[in-house]
Image (tube, coloured by chain):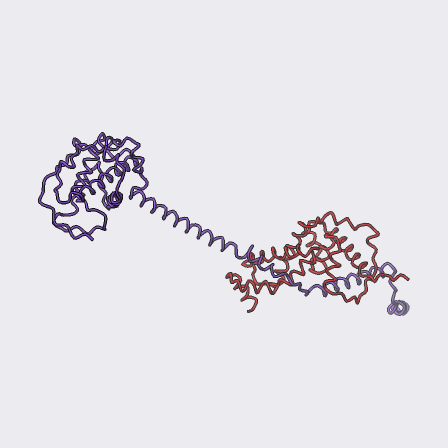
Chain colours: A purple, B red
């Protein structure tokens, strides 16, 4: 036992405090690790909290290209839709106005080159309940009515004292001559425009023509008309229109002599 | 404004908060991008795209970790993507593998270098070395993470790091004076 204890003490004494120097290879590797750590530490401390100043334009680019464009694009799209809708509405209103005022139909100059009896003939051929063949035919009929109205208005102004008779505006008077004649005076287009802008436009092919003529009662004074636009009695203009657009065998118009027309309001 | 308030305001799309967040991190993150990319323009491009991603991905930030760390990670990814676009990463891994280029000389431990000089030193490294050294030494990524991020093996990552360090130590060594 004593010898065993002595052996342990021997090893403890000899190796307990002994430091073995590392070999050259180990020393080199440890040095490399230390150098690597120092190198990493150098860069870590030098660059870890370093801030470079970016250019000012970079934020503007970020805003323009990535942060704001969706909203701007949306606004642009909305504005584009609003603008296009407004433009479409405006165009529709303009087209409607032009159509109602007859500006989109054939011009009077064109009417002289074409066979003027065409609308009247077509209107006469068609049956009472049939609609017009096309929009252009309707426009031609309206144009002829307007020219005739203008002519009649001028004649009415000249012969204001004489009473108009049914024979003057009889259906036998050829509509060809009246529609073929170009407009000569300024009141004619005004009268035509006024006719077309009436809210309830009479259609030659329907029976609404006779009823629309009764809108202004004989007893009521007529509203004042603008200067330069001669007043046309509604019944007379309607009879003229009837004579123009439809032959007598299709729509019969009974024109009777009535009492004297009411006194006209003062013109202004 | 505290950081959560700033993030909340950015989430609401407040332009002033977005500007403040940008001002707070842009300088720091530009340095991060410059560590990976040689040209200043490329670093700024990566910063721009990184911030765009930060603002886009802000709703996904759960405020559990460091916000700066989250932003930094996005910037590092963006810088690596920009690095792949601008500099061919794989070709340069073997460019400096010659033994003469790997001669290591001990760096002076107490070298006091300015940040711009350190950045210039990093930019002398080939793109692959630079990326591995940055990711390991400065970002604290493991070799496994680096291998996944760069699409290389773990062993390649270790060897690239070793070579990068060797090159940097050689460049940091004082030039011998000739008489």
Which quadrant is the N terminus of chain B positioned in?
A: bottom right
Task: Please state the total of marks drawn on the protein image.
Answer: 0
- Horizontal side of A74 relative to A138 (left or right) equals right
Where residue A140 appears, as percent x and y from the top left, is 28, 36
Could you tell whether B9 is left or right of A190 in the image? right
The residue closer to the viewer here, A46 or A14, is A46
Residue B75 place in picture, x, y as percent? 63, 57
Can you say whether A21 is above or below B90 in the image? below
Q: Position of residue A181 (x, y in %)?
A: 26, 36
Question: Is A44 displayed left or right of B1 in the figure?
Answer: right
Q: Residue at x 61, y 60 (%)?
A: B71
Looking at the rendering, which quadrant does residue A249 occupy?
A: top left
Give the residue at x 11% y 46%. A261
A256 relative to B176, above or below: above
Instruction: Judge by depth and name the residue closer to the eye, A178 or B134.
Output: A178
Task: Find residue B108 and report its image quarter.
Answer: bottom right
Image location (x, y in percent) of residue A212: 18, 43
Residue in the foreground of this view, choosing between B94 and A141: A141
Residue under the point 46% across and 51% down: A77
Q: Can you tell which quarter of the image residue A242 is in?
A: top left
Closer to the camera, A150 or B94? A150
């Amino acid at each position: 036992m004593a010898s065993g204890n002595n052996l342990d003490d021997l090893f403890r004494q000899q190796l307990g405090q002994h430091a073995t120097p590392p070999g050259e290879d180990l020393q080199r590797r440890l040095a490399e690790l230390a150098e690597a750590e120092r190198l990493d530490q150098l860069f870590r401390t030098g660059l870890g909290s370093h801030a470079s100043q970016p250019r000012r334009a970079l934020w503007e680019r970020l805003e323009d290209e990535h942060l704001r464009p969706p909203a701007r694009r949306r606004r642009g799209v909305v504005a584009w839709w609003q603008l296009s809708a407004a433009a479409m509405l405006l165009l529709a209103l303009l087209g409607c106005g032009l159509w109602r005022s007859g500006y989109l139909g054939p011009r009077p100059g064109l009417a002289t080159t074409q066979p003027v009896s065409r609308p009247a003939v077509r209107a006469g051929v068609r049956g009472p309940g049939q609609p017009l063949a096309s929009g252009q035919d309707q426009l031609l009929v309206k144009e002829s009515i307007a020219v005739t109205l203008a002519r009649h208005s001028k004649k009415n102004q000249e012969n204001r004292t004489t009473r108009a008779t049914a024979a003057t505006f009889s259906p036998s008077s050829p509509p060809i001559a009246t529609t073929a004649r170009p407009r000569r005076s300024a009141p004619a287009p005004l009268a035509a425009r006024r006719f077309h802008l009436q809210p309830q436009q009479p259609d030659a092919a329907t029976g609404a023509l006779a009823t629309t003529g009764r809108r202004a009662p004989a007893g009521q004074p007529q509203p004042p008309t603008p200067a330069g636009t001669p007043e046309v009695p509604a019944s007379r203009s309607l009879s003229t229109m009837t004579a123009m657009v439809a032959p007598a065998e299709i729509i019969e118009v009974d024109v009777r002599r009535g009492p004297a027309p009411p006194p006209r309001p003062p013109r202004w | 404004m505290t950081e959560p308030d700033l993030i909340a305001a950015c989430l609401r799309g407040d332009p002033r908060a977005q500007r403040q967040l940008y001002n707070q991190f842009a300088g720091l993150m530009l340095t991060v991008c410059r560590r990976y990319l040689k040209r200043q323009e490329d670093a700024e491009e990566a910063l721009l795209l990184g911030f765009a991603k930060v603002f886009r991905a802000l709703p996904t930030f759960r405020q559990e970790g460091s916000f700066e760390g989250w932003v930094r990670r996005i910037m590092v990814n963006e810088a690596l993507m920009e690095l792949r676009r601008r500099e061919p990463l794989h070709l340069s891994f073997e460019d400096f593998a010659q033994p003469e280029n790997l001669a290591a000389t001990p760096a002076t431990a107490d070298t006091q270098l300015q940040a711009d000089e350190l950045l210039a030193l990093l930019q002398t490294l080939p793109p692959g070395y630079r990326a591995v050294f940055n990711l390991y030494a400065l970002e604290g990524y493991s070799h496994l993470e680096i291998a996944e991020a760069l699409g290389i093996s773990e062993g390649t990552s270790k060897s690239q790091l070793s070579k990068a360090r060797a090159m940097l130590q050689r460049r940091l060594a004082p030039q011998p004076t000739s008489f």
